Image (cartoon, rainbow, N blue to C red):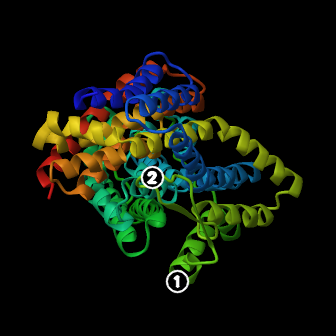
Amino acid sequence: MNNLTLALLAFVPMVWLLLSLGVLKMASHKACFIAVLIASIIAFIGYNMSIKHVGQSVLEGMVYSLLSICWVILAALLVYNITLKTGALDVMQKMLYSISPDRRIQALIIAFAFGGFLEAVAGFGTAVAIPAGILIAMGFAPLKAAVVCLVANTVPVALGVLGVPIQTLAQVSELEVGRLAYDVCIQLFIFAVILPLVLVYIVTDKITKIKGVFIVSVLSGLAFAIGQTLTAVYVGIELAAIVGALSALIVLIVWCKVFPIKTVYKFEGDSELDVEAEKIKAKDAITAWLPYLLVLVFIALIQVFPVVKKDPFIWSHQFYYGESGKLIEFNWLTSGGTVLFLSAIITAYVQRMKRKEFFITCKETLHQVKSSFITIVFVVSLAKIMTYSGMVEASASFIAMASGRFFPLISPFIGAIGTFITGSDTSSNILFGDLQKQTAIKLNLDQYWIVAGNGSGAAAGKMISPQSISIAASSIEHKAKESDMMKYGLKYCLLYVVVMGIFVFLVRV
C-alpha cells in the first residue's frame, strides 16, 4: 500500500468514533470496542503488525488505563459519594449559598469556583450535576443553570482530577509533564480571566449587567489562573486546579464581605427576601471539607518526602515487546487514586459512616463508573494500537502535509473533537496526544506547545459533549431540552477553539 492509502486507513477508527457516537448515538463502550477491532484489523493487514503485538498493545492499554486513570476516577467519586451520604455536601452547599444574594455572584461562586473545585477533585460530571442542581434550588431557570455550569466546566477540566488529563497527555506523548503543564496553563490563562465575565453575561443576557461585578469577575478569573499556574510550576500538577478554584472562591468571598454588591441583580419574580446566612459551626465546616483538606495534606507530604516516589513503592512491567516497547510504571503509594482512597476511609470514619454503609457506597460507586471504565480501557487500547503500529505517524504525516504551517490553528480544535466524541478530555489526550506531537515534529514546531494545544482545546469540547449534556439534563430533571443546551453551548465552544487556535498559532515558538 502507498503512503496515502495507509494514512487514510489510519483515520478510519477515528471517523468511526465520530459517526458512531455523534450520528448513530451508539453507547460509548460499544463504539470504542468496535473501534479497537477496526484498528486491530487495519494494523494487522495494512501495517503488518503481528497478532501477538496487537494483543500486547491492548493488554498494555488495559493495565495502564485501570491503574493510572480508572483508579483515580473511582476513588474521587467515592469521596464525593461519601460526602453526599453523610450530609457533608449539604453543609458545603449552605456555606456557599449564603455568601451573596446577587445572582451573578451566585453563579460565579457555584458554577465557576465550586464547580471548578469539584472538577479538580472528583470530575466524572460532578462539576456539572451538583452546581446545576444548587443553582436551580436557588431559583435559576433550568436551562440557564445547565448552560452556565456547562460553560464553566471548561478551564478547570484541563488539569482536573488531580492532574490526570495532563499526566496522561505527557505519558502518551512521552513529554516532560511539568513543562507540558506549564504550557497548558499559559494557553488557558487569558481564558480563565475571561470565563467569569462570560458566565455573568449568560446569567443576565446583557453586557451592561457585567458592569456591577466586572472587577470581582476579573479578579476571580485572575486568582484561578495565577493559582493554577504557580501551583503547577512550583508545587505539582495534582494540586493546580484545586488551588486555582479555591483561590477564585476566596477572592469572591472576601470581595463580597469587604465590598458588598451595591446594586444587587435579581431575576424577575425573585422575592425581596435576601439570602440569609446560616451559621455553620467551625467543627462542622472542617468536617465537611475534611476529605479535600486531607488530599491537600497528603500531596504536600509527598512533595516534602520524595523518598515515597522511589522503590519499593513503584511497580513496573513491560507488556509490549515490539519496536518502541518499554516498561510502564505505577507508584501505588503516591497515586492520586491511593491518596483519594485514604482520604475516603478517614472521612468515612470521621463523618461517622458505618462500615457496612461504606462498603455499600464502594459497591455503588463501582457500579456507577463501570461503563465509563470500559470505555476508557478501550480508548487507551485503541491509542496503543494506533501508536505502536505506526498509524498515528501516518495520519500525522497526512495532517502535516495538508495543513502545513497553519496546523497550530487547528490543534485545539482536534482536542475539542476528541472530547466531544468521547466525553472525556483525558480520552481526547489519549487519542490525539501523540498525533499532535508527531505532526509538530514533522512541521518543526515546538512539541510541547502543540501538544499542550490538544489539552487546552480538549477542555472546550466538554461543554458540548453529549455525555456532559446528558449529565446536565439529568441533574435538572430534564426540565430543559438537551438540544437547547447543545445549541446554546455550541457558539461558546466554537468561539473558544477559534480564539485558542489563533493564540496557539501566533504565540508558537
Say which quarter of the image contains residue 397.
Answer: top left
Residue beneath label 2, please? 165
- Give the CA distance from mark 2 to mark 1: 24 Å
Locate the C terminus and report the quarter of the image it occupies: bottom left
Residue beneath label 1, please? 304
Say which quarter of the image contains residue 318.
Answer: bottom right
Query: Badge 2 local density, few (<14 within 10 Å), some, or many (20+)?
Result: many
Residue most toward the top? 24
Residue sitting nearer the eye, 29 or 324: 324
Q: Which percent across, then down, holds residue 401?
A: 15, 36
The residue that appears at 56% across and 36% down in the rendered structure is 375
Residue sitting nearer the eye, 285 or 31: 31
Compared to 92, does 349 lie above or below? Answer: below
Q: Which percent across, then down, holds residue 90?
A: 67, 50
Q: Which percent across, then down, holds residue 347?
A: 73, 63
* Residue 397 appears in the rendering: yes
**Circle nearer the N terminus (2, 1):** 2
Q: Which percent across, then down, holds residue 377?
A: 57, 41
Compared to 255, does 396 lie above or below? Answer: above
